[in-house]
Every structure is written in C-alpha cells, then in structure tokens.
Image (cartoon, rainbow, N blue to C red):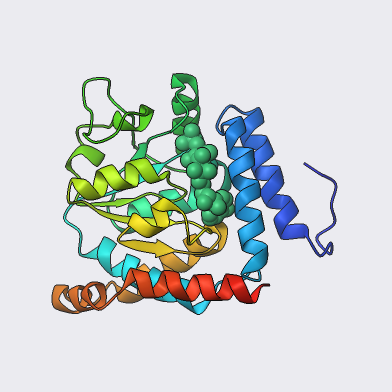
Amino acid sequence: MTDVPESHPRYVSLRMRDDIARGVEQGVTSPHGLIAHGRGEAFDYMIGETTQPFALSAIRSAAAMLLRASHPVISVNGNTAALVPAHLVSLSAACKAPLEVNIFHTSHERERAIERQLRDSGAEGVLLPSPDSTIDHIESNRKFVNPRGIAVADVVFVPLEDGDRCEALRKMDKEVITIDLNPMSRTSRLASVTIVDNVVRAMPLLLETIAELRSLGVPQLETLVSTYDNQTILDQAQQRLRKGG
Ligand code: PTJ
C-alpha cells in the first residue's frame, strides 16, 4: 500500500491505483487493466471526479431494469473484482443475480483468482465460463459463458465492458447495463443503459437506488425503464466532457 495520508488531495484516486496494482500482483487483474484504468482516470478527471446528474438518471433506470428482470446476471472482470468486489457481492444478493466471471484476456488462473476474490468478499456461489457453452457473434474469450448465467440471462450487468461482447449480447436481445467513464466507447453506445461514472462511486449509489425502488410494482418499474433514453444521457455526458472538469 502506498504511504499516502488520507488528507492528500488525490487520496481517493491513489487508493484506487493501489487496488488495481494489488489486483495485478494477486493475479486478479490483467496488466492491460492498468491501461484501461488510466484511460478511465482521464475521463473521470474531465467529468470533475463526481457523480453527475446524467449518471444518476442512468442508475435509476438500471436499478429498475435489474429489479424487473427475470434472470439478471452480473458479469465480473479483473478490474471490477479489484475495485468493488464487496459491492458486486451485495448487488448479487440485492437483485438475486448470480455473479459470473467473464474476462477478455484469456487466463483460467485469473478466472479462479477472481472467483476467490469474490468468495473472500462474501459470495456464496460464483459461476465460471464453460468450454461447452458459447454465445454467438463474438470471437474473443468472452464468448465462453456459463449455461446457468449469461447464456440464459435477460439482463446482463457488465461494468467496464468491451464493445464486442456488448454488441453480441444486444444481438441476442439481452438488455445490457454498463458502467463506463467513456461515453463515446462502443460499449457505451451499444448498451441499453450506460452509467457514465466511476465504478467505485456508481456501485454504492446503485445499491441505494435498488433499496429505494424495491417496493415499486412491475408497471412502475417498467415506466422507469421505458421512459429512459440512453442517447440523451450520452449526449449530456459528452457535453460535460467538452466543458471539462
Ligand atoms: O479482466 P479482463 O481481461 O476482462 O480485462 C478488463 C479490461 C477492463 C482490461 C478490458 O475489458 C478492457 O480492455 O477494457 P477497455 O476496452 O479498455 O474498456 C474499459 C473502459 O472502462 C474504458 O472506456 C475506460 O474508460 C473505462 N473505465 C476504466 N476504469 C473505469 C472505467 N469506467 C468506470 N470506472 C472505472 N474505474
């Protein structure tokens, strides 16, 4: 752990770097995850490193979508396992959605390290990809899924996604919720709901919003989902980027 006092103005950002660096050391996060994180930092800086109104709107719609889903699944990669493992486990419990390890950079050791990380954070069960179950429209390692998870999901929550799988899941008529600080990424543009915020800020807010909306009936949840327009949210996020932090 870097020796940085909590009073340091960049403390939160530096702590996140520590979490990602430790993830790589522990075999949870891919070295490529460091680069992805750096890209995320740059976008975060430009939106002021705070949760913006467009992210709150997306979080509300995402919460409603997860609550009204028949078979939601949470897809976990090496970056989110390092940054927000406990929040992912809480989300799984809050919306009865299995956690499924699904990584871009192929490594069975890392899949098992992510599983361990989630179990250490309280997960009772973690689905792993199966060599016998694949999804169409995708060539990368992400095509391997679990037959009880992503393969049969109606809503897939995939923070820090790559565009190819998002596109494949949408072609399979699944709804995709992502968290991505870059509103211009293919994932952001293809997802059903894009939360343009840092995953470490968005996850606690998503959990709070799920608790808040839990008492709503299906028609009310449906209204929250159907009145949401992802393109409008992405336009607002891009305007914020142009304005700068
Ligand atoms: O563990 P693996 O093998 O599945 O690999 C995971 C990464 C993230 C390395 C892989 O999926 C990847 O290469 O992703 P990309 O295509 O670089 O996309 C990552 C996106 O997440 C980029 O648009 C970043 O801006 C964004 N991002 C990075 N850190 C954060 C973030 N968004 C929200 N919160 C962050 N902390």
Residue 9 locus on image (x, y percent): 81, 65
Q: Quadrant of the C terminus?
A: bottom right
Above or below — where is 18 with respect to 138?
A: below
Q: Which of these two is toward me, 158 or 170?
A: 170
Q: Describe residue 204's horizontal placement relative to residue 70 as left or right.
A: right
The image position of residue 38, as x and y in percent, is 66, 48
* Residue 60 or residue 226, whichever sits in front: 226
In the figure, 51 relative to 85: above or below? below
**Residue 46 image point, x, y percent:** 65, 67
Q: Is residue 20 left or right of residue 55?
A: right
Residue at 16% x, 55% y: name it.
70
Query: In terms of depth relative to the viewer, which is nearer, 94 or 78?
Result: 78
* Number of numbered discs: 0
**Relative image position of residue 130 (x, y in whole percent):** 27, 24
**Is the N terminus in the top left, top right, bottom left or bottom right quadrant?**
top right
Can residue 84 be seen by looking at this rendering? no
Question: Is 62 located above or below residue 191 in the figure?
Answer: below
Q: Is residue 152 left or right of residue 126?
A: left
| Residue depicted at x 37% and y 27% | 141
- Horizontal placement of 88 versus 230: left or right? right
From the viewer's perspective, is residue 139 above or below residue 244?
Answer: above
Q: Residue at x 28, y 32 (%)?
A: 145
Is there any visible trace of residue 138 in the rendered image?
A: yes
Q: Residue at x 63, y 32 (%)?
A: 24
Q: Quadrant of residue 103?
A: top left
